[in-house]
Image: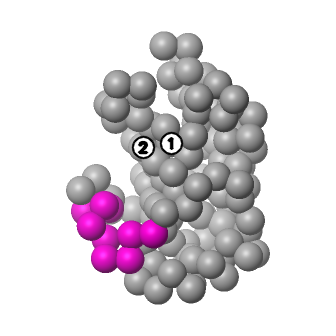
Protein backbone atom coordinates (compact mmCIF):
# COMPACT_ATOMS: atom_id res chain seq x y z
CA UNK A 1 0.00 0.00 0.00
CA UNK A 2 1.16 3.48 -0.83
CA UNK A 3 -0.38 5.80 1.74
CA UNK A 4 -0.16 9.33 0.41
CA UNK A 5 -1.17 12.44 2.35
CA UNK A 6 -1.90 15.45 0.16
CA UNK A 7 -3.67 18.82 0.07
CA UNK A 8 -5.31 20.86 -2.66
CA UNK A 9 -2.99 23.82 -2.04
CA UNK A 10 0.12 21.64 -2.47
CA UNK A 11 1.92 22.34 -5.77
CA UNK A 12 4.13 19.24 -5.58
CA UNK A 13 0.99 17.14 -5.02
CA UNK A 14 -0.32 18.37 -8.37
CA UNK A 15 2.89 17.12 -10.05
CA UNK A 16 2.98 13.83 -8.20
CA UNK A 17 -0.62 12.61 -8.48
CA UNK A 18 -0.62 11.71 -12.22
CA UNK A 19 2.69 9.87 -11.80
CA UNK A 20 1.29 7.90 -8.88
CA UNK A 21 -1.77 7.07 -10.96
CA UNK A 22 0.47 5.55 -13.64
CA UNK A 23 2.11 3.31 -11.01
CA UNK A 24 -1.29 2.38 -9.60
CA UNK A 25 -2.73 1.39 -12.95
CA UNK A 26 0.31 -0.72 -13.78
CA UNK A 27 0.64 -2.58 -10.46
CA UNK A 28 -2.86 -2.86 -8.96
CA UNK A 29 -3.25 -6.26 -10.66
CA UNK A 30 -0.43 -7.50 -8.38
CA UNK A 31 -2.26 -6.47 -5.19
CA UNK A 32 -0.80 -2.98 -4.96
CA UNK A 33 -3.02 -0.05 -4.05
CA UNK A 34 -2.74 3.62 -3.25
CA UNK A 35 -4.78 5.29 -0.55
CA UNK A 36 -4.56 9.04 -1.05
CA UNK A 37 -5.61 10.89 2.10
CA UNK A 38 -6.64 14.49 1.60
CA UNK A 39 -6.08 16.75 4.61
CA UNK A 40 -8.03 19.83 3.50
CA UNK A 41 -10.56 21.07 6.06
CA UNK A 42 -13.10 21.45 3.24
CA UNK A 43 -13.49 18.39 0.99
CA UNK A 44 -14.82 20.64 -1.78
CA UNK A 45 -11.28 22.01 -2.20
CA UNK A 46 -10.02 18.47 -2.76
CA UNK A 47 -12.82 17.73 -5.20
CA UNK A 48 -11.94 20.80 -7.28
CA UNK A 49 -8.30 19.68 -7.32
CA UNK A 50 -9.37 16.21 -8.49
CA UNK A 51 -11.47 17.73 -11.27
CA UNK A 52 -8.27 19.29 -12.61
CA UNK A 53 -6.00 16.33 -11.78
CA UNK A 54 -8.17 13.18 -12.03
CA UNK A 55 -6.86 9.90 -10.66
CA UNK A 56 -8.21 6.34 -10.55
CA UNK A 57 -6.97 5.30 -7.10
CA UNK A 58 -9.09 5.68 -3.94
CA UNK A 59 -9.31 9.10 -2.28
CA UNK A 60 -9.98 9.38 1.46
CA UNK A 61 -10.72 12.53 3.44
CA UNK A 62 -9.10 13.46 6.76
CA UNK A 63 -10.76 16.84 7.33
CA UNK A 64 -9.87 16.87 11.03
CA UNK A 65 -6.29 15.59 10.50
CA UNK A 66 -6.82 12.61 12.81
CA UNK A 67 -5.14 10.09 10.50
CA UNK A 68 -2.32 12.43 9.48
CA UNK A 69 -1.58 13.04 13.16
CA UNK A 70 -1.39 9.29 13.79
CA UNK A 71 1.27 9.05 11.09
CA UNK A 72 3.14 12.19 12.18
CA UNK A 73 2.66 13.92 8.84
CA UNK A 74 4.68 17.14 8.82
CA UNK A 75 5.11 17.81 5.09
CA UNK A 76 2.93 17.84 1.98
CA UNK A 77 2.89 15.46 0.35
CA UNK A 78 3.96 12.65 2.66
CA UNK A 79 4.12 9.13 1.25
CA UNK A 80 4.45 5.96 3.29
CA UNK A 81 4.99 2.55 1.70
CA UNK A 82 3.42 -0.23 3.74
CA UNK A 83 4.29 -3.91 3.29
CA UNK A 84 1.94 -6.91 3.27
CA UNK A 85 2.35 -7.29 7.03
CA UNK A 86 1.20 -3.71 7.66
CA UNK A 87 4.66 -2.35 8.46
CA UNK A 88 5.67 1.12 7.29
CA UNK A 89 8.78 0.42 5.23
CA UNK A 90 9.59 3.60 3.31
CA UNK A 91 8.85 7.24 4.07
CA UNK A 92 9.01 10.22 1.73
CA UNK A 93 8.46 13.80 2.87
CA UNK A 94 7.64 16.25 0.11
CA UNK A 95 8.05 15.56 -3.57
CA UNK A 96 10.69 16.41 -6.15
CA UNK A 97 10.82 15.18 -9.75
CA UNK A 98 12.42 11.76 -9.73
CA UNK A 99 10.80 10.54 -6.49
CA UNK A 100 8.43 8.48 -8.65
CA UNK A 101 11.45 6.38 -9.68
CA UNK A 102 12.03 5.57 -6.01
CA UNK A 103 8.32 4.80 -5.57
CA UNK A 104 8.46 2.40 -8.49
CA UNK A 105 11.52 0.57 -7.11
CA UNK A 106 9.89 0.28 -3.69
CA UNK A 107 6.56 -0.95 -5.09
CA UNK A 108 8.37 -3.63 -7.10
CA UNK A 109 10.37 -4.68 -4.03
CA UNK A 110 7.29 -4.94 -1.82
CA UNK A 111 5.27 -6.84 -4.44
CA UNK A 112 8.04 -9.45 -4.71
CA UNK A 113 8.06 -10.09 -0.95
Is residue 21 visible in the rendered structure shown here? yes
Residue extending furthest toward the top: 113
Q: Are marks 2 and 1 in contact (CB under 8 Å)?
A: yes
> Element at badge 2?
strand
How far apart marks 2 and 1 lie (CA) works out to: 6 Å
Residue span colored magenta: 61-69
Is residue 97 visible in the rendered structure shown here? no
What residue does disc 1 label?
2
> Element at badge 1?
strand
Give me the residue at 57% from left, 40% from top.
33
**Is residue 62 part of the magenta span, yes or no?**
yes
Measured from the top left, where is residue 80 in percent x and y?
42, 43
Residue 70, above or below 86 = below
What residue does disc 2 label?
80
The mark that comes first in sequence, 2 or 1, is 1
Measured from the top left, where is residue 102 in percent x and y?
58, 34
Amino acid sequence: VMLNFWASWCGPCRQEMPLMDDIYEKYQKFGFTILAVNVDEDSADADRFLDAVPVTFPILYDNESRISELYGVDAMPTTIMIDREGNARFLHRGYKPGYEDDYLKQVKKLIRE
